Amino acid sequence: MNLPPTPAQSETPSVPRPVSRVRWAIHLLLIGAYPVFIGLAARAGDATRSPALSGDAKGLLSACAFELLVFGIVFGLAWFASRASPDDLRLRWRTGVWTVPLGVTYSVGIRVALGVFLVGIGTIVVGTGITTSCGLQEFFLANRPDVEAVVDVSAMRENPLYFWLTITLVSFVVAGLREELWRAGFLVALRVLWPNRFGSRAGQIGAVAIAAVIFGFGHLPQGVLAVVLTGFLGFVLGVIIVLHRSIWPAVIAHGMFDATSLALLPWATDQLQELQKTIGH
């Protein structure tokens, strides 16, 4: 029976030769600034309180096209500066037919790990007397990710086309593929510019942590809890890229995680509203 390939125990990072530090510094500057730019743009749009992904199928497609265009320009300029190879950007499909099953399995594992992470934090803060269980509930309700700033929940309920575009195009391309390309582009720049620090397996995990912090703060307009959750998600997805030396299991895992989360969003929103009413009484 064929088993899924296991990650290599060690690797010698593939880097362009000769290495121009100036060109790679430009690459890092462009890639590193992208989440900050997106976060600032989202904050500037807060005044309208309208979802970033407009509440109809046509508007959603236009918004997705615009976001992909902006990312394509930034990523293209970064690549033009560094001339990173496909191997540098972890674009090789290394896990064969196991890529999709691996991605699905990882998405389930991420959800379980995230639940354990949140329960662990809650247990610590309640157990140490920092707050009560009711206070913790109120904190999560007050600081929950502002998903309404991203997607139109009512449109997901009422418009089947909008719903399916959200859990396919948005989840797997706008989120999964775009964000894992960004992560791969950021990681390779650190690996090339500082090979002694970020070239080893441990160093790459350190680079993943840096990327996770930047990725998390790019979601600051959605709230503090969104920063923590997306930072955690970004760290795990980055580790997957490092382990498999390929973005594709992470793309599938990211897309599946977002798709299932968004599919449950209308139901989850209703449950949160009921919980808020209960606490309010």
Image (spheres, grey):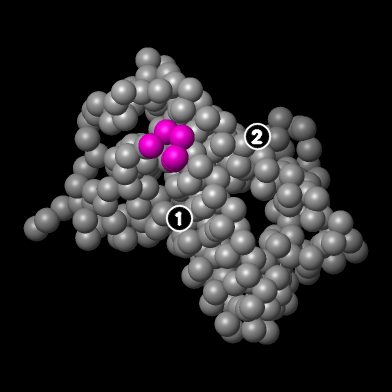
Q: Is residue 200 left or right of residue 206?
A: left
Q: Disc 2 residue type? A: Ile
Residue occupying image coordinates x 40% and y 58%: 252
Q: Is residue 18 left or right of residue 167?
A: left
Please give the label number shown on residue 157: none
How far across and down, in percent of the image, does residue 185 sit? 45, 39
How far across and down, in percent of the image, does residue 260 sit? 51, 66
Residue occupying image coordinates x 27% and y 48%: 92
- Seen as rendered, the residue at the extreme top is 196
Label 2: how many Cα within 10 Å (few below 14, some 14–19, many 20+)? few
Q: Nearer the viewer, mark 2 or mark 1?
A: 1
> Which residues are the magenta region?
79-83
Q: Is residue 214 magenta?
A: no
Quadrant position of the C terminus in the picture? bottom right
Determine if residue 208 is in view.
no
Please give the label number shown on residue 124: 2
Residue occupying image coordinates x 70% and y 62%: 52
Q: Earlier in the sequence, mark 2 or mark 1?
A: 2
Q: Looking at the image, is 73 positioned above or below residue 255?
A: above
Q: Label 1 belongs to which residue?
A: 177
